[in-house]
C-alpha cells in the first residue's frame, strides 16, 4: 500500500537525536531554544514558542489573547476537531462559517454576518496547505477590534502575498505531528511579533511558573513544553523545508496535468497571490465522475493506493460543538465538500515509479 503520508526522516535526524541523548539534556534545553530561533526566522517573525502539540499551541494562543468564558470565536467547521476544541478549552464558544469551494478555507465574505458583541477572535485555518483570505479577514478584525489566530497546522512554508505563513495574524499556530510537512513526531509551535504574547505564551506553557522564582506561579498554566529530542529532529527538518515543499509542489503539478481532462474530477486550485505547500493533495469527485467518491476510494485502496477523506464530518454535527443548533442547510458548501473531497499520496518519499503508478491507476479508473 502506498501510504497517504510518511515522515521524511533519515540519518540526519537519527544522529541529531543521538547527540541529544549523549548530552544528558533531553527535556527543554539549548536545542529547543535554537529550534525556536530558526523557526521564527523561517516564518519571518520576531518570536517562536515551541509546544508539545498543535492543539497546545492553539490553546496557549487563545488563552494569552484573553479569550474566555462566554466569548465567541469564529472559525471553520471543515477542519480537524482540535481547532474547535481549543476554543472550548478556554471556555469560549465556536461560531461556524461556511467555506469557499475553491480553497476549502473560511469564506471571508460570510464572516461579518456572524460577528456579534461577544465575538473576540477569528481562527482561520489554512486547510491542506493553502492560506486563507487574510487581507479580508484582517480588515474585518481591525474594523471590529478582533484578534486573528492563524491555524497554520498544515501550511508551513506557504505564503500569502509573499508573506510567510506564521506571520499572517496576531498569533499563529503550527502542528509538527508525524504526518505534517515537517515533523518532530509530536509537537507544535507558536509564532508572533508581539513581545507581550510571546512572554505570556512562554509563561503559560510551563504552569505559569515565575522564571525568576522557582515554584512561584502567576496563575493557571499547563505543561505544554517540548523536549530537546523533538527539537533536534525539528532542526534537521527545517533544513529540508524548502526541498520538501518543492517536491510536494512538483508532484502536485504532475497530478494536475494528468487529471485535468477527467470529467468529474476537480484538481486543487491555487488562489491568486499565494503558494500552496500541499499538505494534502485534495481533489473533488463530482456527480460527473463515473463512480461515486466512496467507490473511487475503494477502487484506489484495492489497488494499493491509500486515499482518505479529510474531513468526512462537519464539526457542527457533533453535539458538544453545536451551540447554535446549526443545520446542514446552513452550510451548503461544507455539506457538498464532505461528499466530494478525497486526498491521495503526495509526500516527498514517493518514488517516480509510485507517482506514475498512482497516475496510471486513477486514469484507468
Image: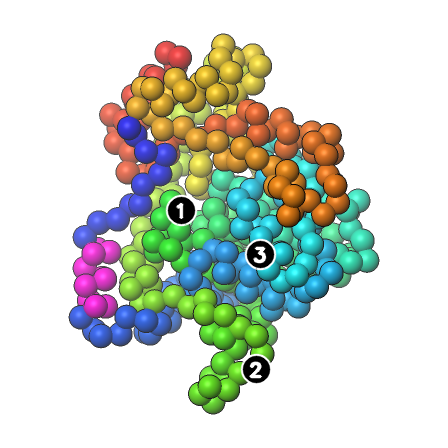
**Which mark sits nearer the N-terminus, 2 or 3?**
3
Q: Residue at x 28, y 28 (%)?
A: 1
* Residue sitting nearer the eye, 311 or 268: 311
Mark 3 neighbour density, 10 Å: few (under 14) some (14–19) many (20 or more): many
Q: Is residue 305 visible?
A: yes
Q: Main secondary structure of the magenta part?
A: helix
**Which mark sits nearer the N-terminus, 1 or 3?**
3
Task: List the residue tagged with mark 1.
Answer: 180
**Which mark sits nearer the N-terminus, 1 or 2?**
1
* Residue sitting nearer the eye, 175 or 81: 81
Mark 1 neighbour density, 10 Å: few (under 14) some (14–19) many (20 or more): many
Task: List the residue tagged with mark 3.
Answer: 86
Residue 66 quadrant? bottom right
Please indicate whether residue 315 sits to the left or right of residue 146 in the image. Answer: left
* Residue sitting nearer the eye, 317 or 344: 317
- Residue 358 belongs to the span the image colors magenta: no
x and y percentages locating residue 161 in the rendered image: 57, 47
Q: Nearer the viewer, mark 1 or mark 2?
A: 2
Please indicate whether residue 62 sits to the left or right of residue 349 in the image. Answer: right
Q: Which residues are magenta?
A: 12-21
Q: How is the image coloured?
A: rainbow
Residue 314 quadrant? top right
Task: State the quadrant of the C terminus.
Answer: top left
Amino acid at each position: 500500500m502506498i501510504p497517504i503520508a510518511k515522515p521524511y526522516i533519515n540519518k540526519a535526524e537519527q544522529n541529531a537525536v543521538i547527540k541529544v541523548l549523549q548530552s544528558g539534556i533531553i527535556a527543554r534545553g539549548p536545542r529547543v531554544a535554537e529550534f525556536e530561533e530558526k523557526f521564527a526566522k523561517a516564518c519571518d517573525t520576531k518570536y517562536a514558542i515551541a509546544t508539545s502539540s498543535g492543539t497546545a499551541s492553539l490553546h496557549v494562543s487563545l488563552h494569552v489573547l484573553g479569550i474566555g468564558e462566554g466569548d465567541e470565536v469564529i472559525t471553520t467547521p471543515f477542519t480537524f476537531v482540535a481547532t474547535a476544541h481549543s476554543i472550548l478549552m478556554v471556555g469560549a464558544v465556536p461560531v461556524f462559517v461556511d467555506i469557499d469551494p475553491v480553497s476549502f478555507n473560511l469564506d471571508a465574505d460570510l464572516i461579518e454576518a456572524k460577528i456579534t458583541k461577544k465575538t473576540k477572535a477569528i481562527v482561520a485555518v489554512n486547510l491542506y496547505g493553502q492560506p486563507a483570505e487574510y487581507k479580508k479577514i484582517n480588515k474585518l478584525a481591525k474594523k471590529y477590534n478582533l484578534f486573528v489566530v492563524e491555524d497554520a497546522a498544515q501550511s508551513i512554508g506557504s505564503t500569502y502575498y509573499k508573506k510567510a505563513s506564521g506571520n499572517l495574524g496576531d498569533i499563529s499556530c503550527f502542528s509538527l505531528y508525524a504526518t505534517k510537512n515537517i515533523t518532530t513526531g509530536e509537537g507544535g509551535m507558536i509564532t508572533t511579533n508581539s513581545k507581550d504574547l510571546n512572554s505570556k505564551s512562554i509563561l503559560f506553557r510551563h504552569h505559569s511558573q515565575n522564571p525568576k522564582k522557582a515554584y512561584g506561579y502567576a496563575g493557571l498554566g499547563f505543561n505544554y513544553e517540548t523536549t530537546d529530542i523533538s527539537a533536534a529532529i525539528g532542526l534537521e527538518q527545517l533544513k529540508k523545508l524548502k526541498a520538501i515543499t518543492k517536491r510536494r509542489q512538483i508532484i502536485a503539478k504532475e497530478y494536475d496535468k494528468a487529471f485535468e481532462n477527467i470529467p468529474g474530477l476537480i484538481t486543487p486550485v491555487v488562489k491568486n497571490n499565494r503558494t500552496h505547500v500541499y499538505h494534502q493533495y485534495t481533489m473533488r469527485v463530482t456527480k460527473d465522475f463515473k463512480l461515486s467518491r466512496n467507490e473511487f476510494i475503494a477502487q484506489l485502496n484495492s489497488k494499493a493506493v491509500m486515499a482518505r477523506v479529510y474531513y468526512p464530518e462537519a464539526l457542527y454535527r457533533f453535539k458538544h460543538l453545536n451551540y447554535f443548533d446549526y443545520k446542514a442547510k446552513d452550510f451548503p458548501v461544507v455539506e457538498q465538500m464532505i461528499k466530494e473531497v478525497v486526498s491521495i499520496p503526495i509526500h516527498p518519499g514517493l518514488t517516480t515509479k509510485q507517482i506514475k503508478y498512482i497516475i496510471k491507476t486513477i486514469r484507468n479508473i
